[in-house]
Every structure is written in structure tokens, then in C-alpha cells.
Image (cartoon, helix red, strand yellow):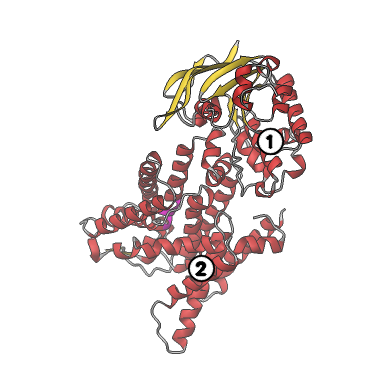
Amino acid sequence: MSLLRAQSLTKSFRGLKAVSEASFEAPEGGIVALIGPNGAGKTTCFNMIAGVFAPDSGRIVFADKEIQGQRADQVCAAGVGRTFQIVKPFAGLSVLDNVMVGSFLREKTESGARRVALEVLAKLRLEPKASQPASALTLPDRKRLEVARALATRPRLLLLDEVMAGLRPTECDEMVAVFRELNRADGLTILLIEHVMRAVMALAQSIVVLHHGEIIARGAPAEVVRNPAVLECYLGEETEV
Amino acid sequence: MSRAAALLLVLLALLAAFPAFASSYLLSVVTLILFFAYAGQAWNVMMGFAGQLSLGHSLYVGVGAYAAAILFTRYGIGPWAGVWVSIGVCALLGAAIGFLAFRFGISGVYFALLTIAFAEFTRIGFDHLAITGGPGGLFLKVSQRDSWDLLNLRGPPEMFYYVILALAAGAFLLCRALLGSRAGYYWRAIRENEEAAQALGINTFRWKLLAVMLSAAMTSVAGVFNAFYYNNLFPEQIFHISRSIEIILGPVIGGVGTLFGPVIGAALLTSLADAITEALAALGWEVPGVKQVFYGFVLFAVVMFLPNGIWPAIARRLGVSR
């Protein structure tokens, strides 16, 4: 059963096709990676799913309901959490308060929201920094905070937009472990955009490759990374030396 | 009990006992301070909490004042009923302005300009309305009574002092409760980053509208107080942009978005400006506009040296939370 189905998504910006007839799915409880070179249309796909803007055409079905064209807050309330590629912390608030903003979506009381936020912070090992202002965090910690905030809304589907970028390999492995645990224990479905192949290979059960707004390959990680079309768009054509 | 709560209780006790030993002049100064502390607190809900800059809060003071005053003078409806009309009218007015702005994505400086525009054309409109008395003003019957007529808000200065003290304390407690609630968290999230707030499931349009409506409603009560305390209303005065600026100076200097900021800012500005005017008068110098020049210097100094306002700096020293 697919939790998320994107069907023939198309989006143009001033005549330039950012995404063209892209269809992909995320099965319930699965982890799917969306990869491709810069400018391939990955973040545009995310923004259409998350309700930042509507697709020009195509359908997005989440939990058997069409959600294309809904506002970002409606999509989030329906159960889709997202992180931003360019992190957007609430800089003037503490780390805990940042996460509580997320947890207030399902917890109406302050004590409830605080409890959920602390649980999420513990999962992401941000608890020691709970009372620090978000503006004092390092970039890796800001990325964790993005994830924590999104998780606090208790999503069924989590959209991760390059959360591994800028992390050291050990930090990256830590994050991978966190997402694996969330996926395994809570049944969280994850759709991630990622350039760090170390994380993609460790996490993804299937990979969708976008290039110039079109899907050029999909399948299990091991197959996709050997696919000549994928290698070509990433590395250029293979030549015998 | 936290240190902030202890500090607050001491302050409240001092203020409650104040009329017993204060001269009538000092009483009028502190009444004015409390008035600006209350109005500043109301403005702070919109700007300090939700990040929506209003430079036209005189609109709500004026409309609130006129609504209650007209009901009282022409229809004999007392202020305790009239205040609800003022609150309702101003909340709707705030909703209309907020709807226009947020529906069409007007924000930042342009939103501030819109709030000025509404205050300005209401000022001009009220100058030409028969029911408001036009530029000739609207007057409430002055009664130099020694007895308290709380029902009709007619009485000695002490009564008005306690009314505005109760309002200022109530607004403080309300804002404190709001900051700890979901609304407070959502407003601050919107202030910090609206896109991220919306991605966390916050209907930003609705919450911003709520902030404007609440701020407008609270400010209208200041207007009702204004009408019954001064007993005269002129559109040129009450809707004037300088009144809007006076309201926001307190929280800006005290600390935008903080609870104590509006109180401390109002206390500092009003008392010092009055002291300077009095001192100059005692020396035999009448200097028109000295208050405004003083406001300018204080604002300048705060922006230069304490850009977050005075309270955050004091709070750090005292070791209390903001």
C-alpha cells in the first residue's frame, strides 16, 4: 500500500519546466530516496507535496486523499512533516521552544507539548542543548533541529531535504541510525532528497532518479547506482582509458 | 516563587499603596505611565509576539474612545456596557485591516503603512461626522465628585488610577498567560519565520488575524479609559500619528516582545519627559516640543546601546527570565 502517490506531477516556472510528468510512490513504512543532479527538480517535487505551491498538473495522493493544492499547514496537519534544505530555525527561540511549536500541533497543552518535544530532542541527541537559543547552534545541530521540529508534529510521512549535507561521516551515520530507528520502531515513512550517497545507500529501500525534471531511473539502490543513464547524468559518459 | 514573580508582587503592592502618600501631580504622572504601560502591552501582542508592525494604534484608541463616549453622552449607556461595543468594533476593524493585508500578502513596512493609512483616514473621517462632533470635539460632562461612581466612571483621580492599574496588571497577566500558551508559541514562530511556522501546521493567516484582533480589542479599552479620564475627544488629537508613536515607544525602549518591556519603557519615558518639562518650567523656560526631542534622544541611545531594549539587559543582571 502506498502512503504517498505522486502522479504525473508537472511544474513550470516562467515557461521553464522544473518537473515534468513525474510519478513516484512511497510505500507505507518505506524509505525512498529522490536523487539527481542539482536543478533536477527534487526540491520542487517536495514543495508541491508539502503545499508550498500547487503542481500545474498531476495528482498527489496521501493516505488515500488528494492533497495537491492544499496549504502547507493543511498538508502538515494531514500528517506530512518536512525539513528545509536551507534551514529555517526560529532563531530567537530556544531549541526546546522551537520543537514545542511543532508538538503543539497534536498536543494542546503546554505540558503535553513540552513532554513530546523533550522526547523528540532525546531521540536526536539534542537534549543537552534544549535551553540554548537556536541561533547559537552549529549547522549540523540546526539540521537536527529541523528534523526534530518536523518529527514533533507526529508525521506519518517525513520529507527530508538534504539533511546530511555538511555533516561529517560519523555525524551522518548517527543521523542514519536515528532515521532507521524511527522507521523501524514508529513505522515512519520517509522520502528523502540526498546527495550524500553514503546515507542514501544505508537508508533507502528504493531510489528515484530525477534529471532535468524527468524521472530517468528507479528501483533498488544496488541496481540504480549501476544504471548507465544514472552514471551518465552524475559522472558523464564512461570511457575506456 | 520565582524572582520575577516576587519582583512583580512588590511592585504591585507599592503601586496599590501609592495614592495614600502621593501628591495629585505625581498621581497623574503615574496614571499616565500605567496608561502607556497598558497600551504598550496591547501593541506588543501584535508586534512583540506575532511580529506584525502597527504604526496606527491610535486608530483603536480613538475608535474605542469615541464609541463608548458617544454611547454615554447621547444614549446614556454606561462605560461598562460601552466598553464591549468598543472592543467589538475595534476587533472587527482589526480583522478587516488584517484580512486585507494578510489575504493579499502585504507584510513588513507595507503592512505598517496600511495601519497608518487606516488611522489617518479615520481621523479625517471623524472630523466630518456629525455624531462625533467633528473637529469641535466631543465632551463628557465633567463631575468633580469626591465619591466614586465606578458604574459610570465618574469620580476623583484616585478612582481612575486604580482602574488603569487594574487594567495594566490584567494586561500583564493576560500576556504572560498567552506567552506560555499555544498562541504565544505560534505567534513567536510566525514572527521568527513564517514559512517554517506554516510548515509545522500553523494556519499563519488565522493566527496573525487573531493577534491583530486581540491587540485592537485591548487597545480599544485604553481608548475608553482615555475618554472618561480626560472627558474630551478631538479627532486631531486622539487619532494623530504621534499618539501611535507614543504608544509604541514604551515597548520599543523597554524591550519588544517582553512582558516587562512596555511597563519599564512607559515608566522611564513618561516620568523623565515630565521631569524635564517641569524642571525647565521651574527655571522659567517654556520649551515647546522638548518632550519629543527627549523621546528622540532616548530612542537613539537605546537603538545604539541596547538594541533589544532595556528590560533584557536588566533581566540578565537580575538573573530573571525575560
Residue that lies at the very extreme toward the front in this rendered image: A241
* Type of amino acid under label 2: Leu
Prevailing secondary structure class for the magenta stretch in the rendered image? helix
**Residue B132, image quadrant:** bottom left
Q: In this view, does B312 lie above or below A153?
A: below
What span is colored magenta in the figure?
A: B218-222
Residue that lies at the very extreme toward the right in this rendered image: A170
Q: In this view, does A165 lie above or below B273?
A: above
Inspect the magenta stretch and tell me whether residue B221 lies in it.
yes
Question: What chain does badge 2 belong to?
Answer: B
Q: What element carries label 2?
A: helix
- Quadrant housing the N terminus of chain A: top right
The reply, left or right, for residue B140 in relation to residue A164 is left
Question: What chain does badge 1 belong to?
Answer: A
**Residue B299 numbered tag:** 2
Q: Is mark 1 on a helix, strand or loop?
A: helix
Q: Which residue is drawn at 39% across and 33% down?
A: A14
Q: Residue at x 26, y 64 (%)?
A: B137
The reply, left or right, for residue A188 in relation to residue A78 is right
